[in-house]
Amino acid sequence: MIQGSIVALVTPMTEDGAVDELSLKKLIEFHIEQGTDALVPVGTTGESATLDEDEHCYVIKTVVDTVAGRIPVIAGTGANCTREAITLTLKAKQVGADACLLVTPYYNKPTQEGLFLHYKAVAEAVDIPLILYNVPGRTACDLLPETIGRLAKISNIVGVKEATGKLERVKQIRELTGADFAIYTGDDATSREFCLLGGNGSITVSGNVAPKLVHEMLMAALRGDSELAAEIDAKLTGLHSSLFIQSNPIPVKWAVVEMGLMGKGIRLPLTWLTPDCFDVVRKAMLQAGVLSA
């Protein structure tokens, strides 16, 4: 089971919106050096919604090839079309991803039975470990614990990213799935409490900016060291909030650029962070010790 800090990786782009392979490779080396436990390319934070299929697969392959087995790679392959999700998942397997993360079909508003059949179809079509991804604030549908429990009985559905921020769901999902099912949070602000309650880690945005601290905080929480986890998390609270001051990944891409790790690039309809937010994000970065005063 993959545990700890699983970074939802930004996709570096040039100012004209092209994928920046050199900066992507630089970011990967940075994360491995800083102790990141696994990487998720082309999730929401990686701007999957605005990459075409070829670019999507190119980013996954670049990450897999650069990582070269040093840490796990969990490819974002979700879609609101089941056939498209199967295609992306199959291609991620072909290029060597360790697992796939599939967001619930967005906009369609499927029923719980529709969600079950969607994930079941992907699992039956592609023999690779699958992680469900529930983020109703973005998708307009909520994958309920009872449906997760049904899906956990499918052998290659191995975990869930639960991004509701509802801490009570850790216990609910655990009781419906079992100890071998991975339960990750997608809510940085509550990730410490989530892991202290029995979660297995965080698929994190904050980890893009302060990977070492996020890793150390989550490891402390997974060991049950609540005091140390809280002490480290106190340095991260500003990031947990300021990185969502505008739509993700707008603030986090700005922060990674400020750290000198990539150039300034984002795709429409997302726009660059507005100047009135610069000081808020910069203050959080200073608090986390990733920028010098």
Image (cartoon, rainbow, N blue to C red):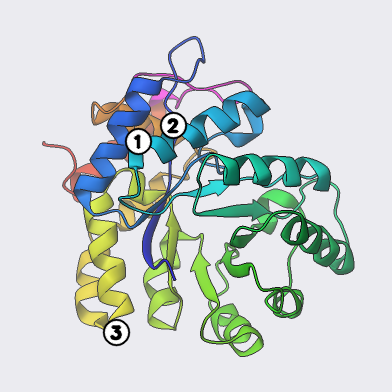
Mark 1–mark 2 contact, CB under 8 Å? Answer: yes
Nearer the N terminus, badge 2 or badge 3?
Answer: 2
Q: List x then y, in percent, for residue 191.
A: 41, 67
Judge whether residue 3 is colored magenta: no
User: Magenta segment, which residues?
Assistant: 263-275
Which SS class for mark 3?
loop
Magenta: main secondary structure equals loop
Residue 225 appears in the figure: yes
Identify which amino acid the numbered label 1 is placed on. Answer: Thr
Which residue is painted at 67% across and 28% down in the image? 53
Residue position marked by numbered label 2 in the rendering: 62
**Cα separation between marks 2 and 3:** 36 Å
Q: CA distance from mark 1 to mark 2?
A: 6 Å
The N terminus sits in image quarter: bottom left
User: What residue is pinned by disc 3?
Assistant: 224
- Picture coordinates of residue 256, whole percent (x, y): 32, 33
Residue that badge 1 annotates: 66
Q: Is residue 48 above or below residue 288?
A: above
Q: Is residue 267 magenta?
A: yes
Of residues 190 and 88, the one drawn nearer to the viewer in this rendering: 88
Residue found at x 23% / y 54%: 35
Q: Is residue 37 left or right of residue 156?
A: left
Going by the numbered disc 3, the residue's amino acid type is Gly
Q: Nearer the viewer, residue 251 or 28?
A: 28
Above or below, 5 against 41 in this view is: below
Question: Alpha carbon of mark 1 to alpha carbon of mark 3: how far?
Answer: 33 Å
